[in-house]
Image (cartoon, rainbow, N blue to C red):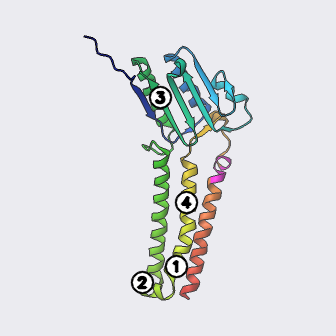
Amino acid sequence: MAVRELEPRTLNVFLGSMRLWRDDLEQIESVMQEAAAEVFILTDKYQIDKVADLAQLKEPRIKSLHFVAEGGRVQLVIKGSGAYLQVLDPNLQERGMAAEITQIANRCRKFGGVRTMRSSASIAVVTGVLSVAAIAMTVVAVAGGVDYARQNDLPSAVAWLAIPSSLATASLGYLYARNTINTRTRAEAPPWMKRNADALVTNAIVSAIFLFLGIWIGKLTN
């Protein structure tokens, strides 16, 4: 008697938070072409014949990239909020393809072993909150202890500034955790300062908030 599954098996692979260059995307394309006869590629604005066509775009980055093969049975979706590979009823060759794509994703991942954007953002938020808490405890200790802090309303001052500081840190973590899809190769990458301008501005804002906190606390303790 033959036994067959009514529902096809689905292979789902979540690829995590990545920074991808055209070199990486071309490797992914090559791996998929070895396992599928034809691969269709869609960006958020265009349909392209091959990844190399991204070089023709003026935009340095795109919002999303969608690889489709085997009549939609094989799909790789990369967008800002997440990236995943889905294969319906995978054969041995397609499982090998999934393993190779995962290796490429691991090399491009922003946060070591963290695979989801939610986890990446959570790490950033927790780190920010703990940092603010540590600074608050240090300020209270330097100011002369808990009783002195209560008399001078230091907890309120710290809490008032801790909220925007935490939000700024969380925003930085959220932006960093998003997938980045570059249309240029690593060799064509712009200078480090230009690539990280947004992160540097956010860090400057957070630093300014903490500087203001220090000056305010200093005035209260005098």
Residue holding disc 1: 156
Q: Residue at x 50, y 61 (%)?
A: 128
Dividing the image into 4 quarters, which one contains the N terminus?
A: top left
Q: Residues within 10 Å of mark 3 (few under 14, many from 20)?
A: some
Residue at image position (43%, 80%) is: 141
Q: Is residue 196 magenta?
A: yes
What's the mark number on residue 146?
Answer: 2
Q: Is residue 218 above or below residue 105?
A: below
Kind of residue sitting beneath label 4: Thr
* 220 falls in the magenta region: no
The residue tagged 4 is 169
**Is 169 placed above or below 65 here?**
below
Marks 1 and 4, how far apart at CA: 20 Å
In 3D space, how far apart are the residues under numbered discs 4 and 2 (Cα atoms)?
27 Å
Instruction: Give the SS element for disc 4.
Output: helix
Q: Secondary structure at mark 2?
A: helix
